[in-house]
Amino acid sequence: MAEAKKTAAKTTKKAAPAKKTVAKKAPVATPKLNDATYATGKRKDSVARVYLMPGKGNITVNGKASSDYFRRAVLQMIIAQPFGITKRETSYDIVAMVEGGGLSGQAGAVKHGISKALEKVEPELRATLKAAGFLTRDSRVVERKHYGFRKARRSTQFSKR
């Protein structure tokens, strides 16, 4: 009788679920950066390492197309500004690695890096980029919270009585 219970217990066990196979994504083909012009752009807490090379106008940010990384149209326009003002939209490819901050700061950092790289490649563009203010590092950062305040400048409500 004990043997019958053992065999019944063996037959009622569930089979182990099949392992799911995850399709691996193909790695993004990164261009060779050996002959590229390098520049660093900064904005708020973001730092962008920008590589500029002759090409067709493709912009890659952190391994993704710029339209996939920066989905808002305003951020895409910010990145394209240095090319638009210098009339070089389809002359160069960009590979940028950005870290820190939010998307707005990152877009500003990439714009600053692209401008500095364009100036290195074509020094005659310096006047145009400088007049537009693209070569100046925007030094505005978030003010720190101060002692006795709720935020940087927000105080508690004053009560007279």
Image: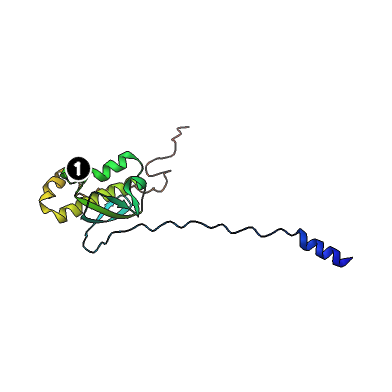
Q: Residue furthest top?
A: 161
In the picture provided, is 98 more to the left or to the right than 124?
A: right
Task: Please state which amino acid type lies under the numbered disc 1.
Answer: Gly
The residue sitting at 35% across, 51% down in the picture is: 64
Q: Name the quadrant of the N terminus.
A: bottom right
| Viewer-side residue, 104 vs 123 | 123
In the picture provided, is 35 more to the left or to the right than 154?
A: left
Estimate the x, y position of residue 148 in percent, counting from the top left: 42, 46
Q: Residue furthest bottom?
A: 3
Asked if residue 100 is positioned above or below residue 87 in the image, the reply reads: below
| Viewer-side residue, 20 vs 50 | 20
Estimate the x, y position of residue 103 in percent, counting from the top left: 35, 46
Estimate the x, y position of residue 27 in percent, counting from the top left: 38, 58
Q: Which residue is mark 1?
A: 84
The residue sitting at 11% across, 53% down in the picture is: 123
Asked if residue 88 is positioned above or below residue 53 in the image, the reply reads: above
Estimate the x, y position of residue 72 in percent, counting from the top left: 35, 40
User: Mark 1, residues whose alpha carbon is within 10 Å: few (<14), some, or many (≥20)?
Assistant: few
| SS category of the residue bearing label 1 | helix
